[in-house]
Amino acid sequence: MVLKFDRLTISLISIVHNYLLVFLASTPRKDIIGSVSKDLRDKHIVLCVCGSVAASESPEICRELMRHGAEVYTVMTDAARKIIHPNLLEWASGNPVVTKLTGKTEHIELVGNWQGKADLVLIAPATANAISKIAAGVDDNPVTTVASVALGTKTSIIIAPGMHEPMYTNPIIKENIGRLRALGVEFVEPRLEEGKAKIASTEDIVAAVVRKLRYKDMQGLRVMVTAGPTVEHIDPVRIITNRSTGKMGVAIAEEAWRRGADVTLIQGPGLTGVTHGIRTIHIYTTEQLRNAVVGDLKSANYDLVVSAAAPADFKPDKPFGRKLSTRDTRQLKLTLSPTTKVIDEVKKVSPKALLVAFKAEYKLPKDRMIKSATTLLNEAGADLVVANDVGKRGVGFEADTNEVYIVDRKKSVTHVPLLPKEEIARRILDMAVHLLKQKK
Ligand SMILES: Cc1cc2nc3c(=O)[nH]c(=O)nc-3n(C[C@H](O)[C@H](O)[C@H](O)COP(=O)(O)O)c2cc1C
C-alpha cells in the first residue's frame, strides 16, 4: 500500500516529529544550554555545593555553565541541604541531585576512571570544612568523596571558597589551600568584603571553568591589551576624553586569558570588574598609558600587543591649576596639542611582538576606512589593523557589538559583520594566533 500526503500534512508530521525529538531527548529546563556560547559544548561538569550561605548562588552558577553549553550534575552535602533545597538544583540542572552515596556508586559514575566521566569538578561554594577534609584525604560525604576520586583520576578541580574572613585567613585553611594548589587544584579567589571572604562572582567562576576546559591555543603566550579612553585635564575637574568604554579591549583580554595566555591589561577609566586572573594596570592620561605600555614592554618579552585603547588625541597646552568659574570666565579659549602616539612606540621597544592596532573612523565609506587602516599599518609597523566606523549604529563606542574590517600586511581585508564584541575578539585573536604560528 502506498500512502500519499499533501504538503500541509507532511509539514505537520515534520513539526510533530521534531517536537517529539526535542521532548524525548531533553527537558525544557535544559533549553538554555548553549544559549550564550558554545565554549563548554559537550563538557560535563560536576557542581559540588557545600554548606555556605553562598549556596544560594549555586543555581545561577549552574545555569550560567549551561548557557555556555555544559551539561551539569550537582552534588550536595547535608549542610548545603539546610541552606538550599535539592529541588532547586534539580530544576536548575535538569538532572537528579546526588545527596547521598548509594549502591549506584555515584562518585565513580561521576568522576571514576571510565569513558563517561565528567570533565571537571567545580566546588562552589566550598566551605572551610570541605577544603580541609579534601586536603586531608577525608571522604565522608558525597562532595568530599567526589573530590577524592577526582584527585585520584586527575580530573580537573576548581574550588570557589566562601566563608567568613577569619575562617579564610585561618593559617590551617591557608595551608590546606596551598596543599590542594600543589596538587593542581585551582582556586577562584573570594572577594574580601564586609569581613567576609565572599564567593567570587558567577562570571569569574564560569570564566575560570571556560579557561580550564576550552582549547588553549594561546598557552605560553604573553599578551598585552590596552583598553578604554584616556583623559586630559582642562582644569582639576574638567576633562577632554572620548566615548570609548573599553568593552572591546576587555573582551579581547578576557578571550586571550580564556585561551591560556598570560595577559596584562592596561585600562583607562570606564569599565570595572575584569576577570580576576588578568593583571590589570589602571591609567588615566595618555602619558600614563604611554609610560605603562613602554615600561611593561621593556620589562618582559611580549608575543602580542593589542592596542584597543582610544587615547584622547589632544590635550590643553596649559591646563588650569584651579577650577574655572563660569562667573569669572566669560569666554574660554583653549589651545590643544596632539598627545603622544602610543601606538608608534610599540614596535620601537618590542620589534618582535605582533602588533594589532585599532582605527576608529566616523562615517567614512568602506574604501576610505580601509585606506586609512593601511596607512596606520605602515606608520605604526602594525601586523593587523582593525578598522571600524563608530558613526554606525551598534558599532564601536559604548555598544556591546561591533562591525570591523581587519587589514593585514598583505593588504587582504577580512570583514566581520555586526556581532557581539566577544565574538569579534575571538575572530581578531584567531587571526593573530594564525600569524604568530606563521612567524615561528
Ligand atoms: C547559615 C550558615 C551559613 C554558613 N556559612 C558558611 C560559609 O559561608 N562558609 C563556611 O565555610 N561555613 C559556613 N557555615 C558552616 C558550615 O555549614 C559547617 O562548617 C558545615 O559543617 C559545613 O559542612 P560541609 O562542608 O559538609 O558543607 C555556615 C553555617 C550556617 C548554619
Image (cartoon, helix red, strand yellow):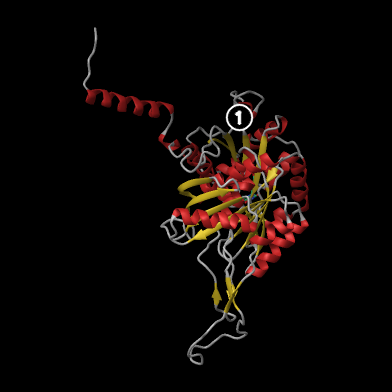
Residue at x 55% of width, y 86% of height = 324
Question: Outermost residue toward the bottom?
Answer: 328
Lateral position of residue 380 relative to residue 13, left or right: right
Visible in this render: residue 247? no
The residue that appears at 64% across and 58% down in the rendered structure is 380
Tag count in the figure? 1
From the top left corner, tell me how far across and down residue 132 is, in percent. Answer: 73, 43
Residue at 55 percent across and 39 percent down: it is 39
Image position, residue 74 (x, y; %): 56, 36
Answer above or below: position of 207 versus 313.
above
Instruction: Report the front residue among 88 and 1.
Output: 1
Ligand 1 lies under 8 Å from the Cβ of mark 1: no
Closer to the camera in the image, 126 or 285: 285
Q: Quadrant of the N terminus?
A: top left
Where is residue 258? Give x, y as percent: 62, 45
The amino acid pointed to by label 1 is Leu
According to the picture, the residue beneath numbered tag 1 turns out to be 110
Vertical placement of 215 versus 177: above or below?
Answer: above
The local secondary structure at tag 1 comes to helix
Q: Can I make out residue 270 in this image?
A: yes
The C terminus - image quarter: top right
Residue for point 74% across, 42% down: 180
Place residue 216 in its image quadrant: top right
Does 126 sit left or right of 203 as displayed?
right
Spot occupied by residue 370 in the image (x, y as percentages of width and height): 51, 53
Q: Using the image, determine if residue 408 lies above or below residue 284.
A: above
Q: Residues within 10 Å of mark 1 (few under 14, many from 20)?
A: many
Residue toward you, 381 or 264: 381
Q: Quadrant of residue 218?
A: top right
